[in-house]
Amino acid sequence: MGESAEPVGEVLVLGRSRVWPAVAVPVAVVIGLIVGAVLFDWVGWGGLVLSAGSIVLAFVHWRNAVLADDTGLLVRDRGGLRRSYAWSEIERMGWQDAGMWGSSLVVYPRGGPYDVPGPNASVNVARIWRPRRAHLADPMPALLRTHGIKTISEP
C-alpha cells in the first residue's frame, strides 16, 4: 500500500478534483469582506487570511484523482501516482459526502473484526472536490459488481 505504481490494463476515473468548487466559496467570502471593508470601514483579517489559504490549497490539490485499473485503486496527488488498495483487499467502498469540502472515497478493507482499518473501521483513501454526476455515468457501481465489492450503504 502506498508505493509508486503504474496502471495495469484499462484505467477508469472514479473521481477527479475540480478547482472551481474549492475556489468559489473562499472567493465569495473575500468579496464579502471587501464589500464590508468599503461599506462599513471594517476589515476581517482572519477571514481574509483563511479564504486566501483555502484558495491556495485548492490550486495545490486540483490534480487529485482516484483511478481504478485491473489490479485495484490508484490515487493521483501532488506526490505522484500511487497504488492504494488491491481489489482483493476491499470489503466495501464508496463515496462519502464531506459537504462543501468535497467527497472522500471510503474503503473498508478485508480483515478480522478487530482490525483497524478493517471490515468494521473505514479508511479515507482520497478526498477530492468532485462535480455532481447528474450528466455523467458513474463507473463505480459496475466496477464494484465486477470485483464482488459491496457499497458502503450495504451491510
Image (cartoon, rainbow, N blue to C red):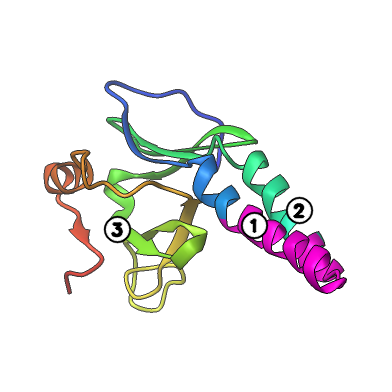
Q: Position of residue 77 (x, y in %)?
A: 57, 38
Q: CA distance from mark 2 to mark 1?
A: 7 Å
Mark 2 and 1 residues: CB-CB less than 8 Å, in contact? yes
Could one spot residue 50 in this view of the protein? no
Label 2 crowd (10 A; few <14 / some 14-19 / many >=20): some
Q: CA distance from mark 3 to mark 1?
A: 30 Å
Residue on which disc 2 sits: 52
Which of the two discs, 2 and 3, labels the residue nearer the N terminus? Answer: 2
Residue on which disc 3 sits: 93
Question: Is 37 inside the magenta-drawn segment?
Answer: yes
Query: Which quadrant is home to the C terminus?
Result: bottom left
Q: Position of residue 93 (x, y in %)?
A: 29, 58
Element assignment for label 3? strand
Q: Is residue 113 left or right of residue 116?
A: left
Q: Quadrant of residue 48?
A: bottom right
Question: Is 79 inside the magenta-drawn segment?
Answer: no
From this view, report whether residue 151 is shown above or below residue 64: below
Which of the two discs, 2 and 1, labels the residue nearer the N terminus? Answer: 1
Majority secondary structure of magenta residues: helix
Q: In the displayed orientation, state which residue is furthest to the front.
A: 39
Which label sits on residue 26? Answer: 1
Which label sits on residue 155? Answer: none
Q: Is residue 116 left or right of residue 49?
A: left
In this rendering, which labeled residue sits more in front, label 2 or label 3?
A: 2
The three-letter code of the residue at mark 2 reads Ala
Element assignment for label 2? helix
From this view, report whether residue 134 is shown above or below residue 154: above
From this view, report whether residue 39 is shown above or below residue 62: below
Q: Which segment did they paint magenta?
A: 25-48
Q: Quadrant of residue 139?
A: top left
The three-letter code of the residue at mark 1 reads Pro
Residue at the spot 26% in from the left edge and 66% down from the top edge: 152
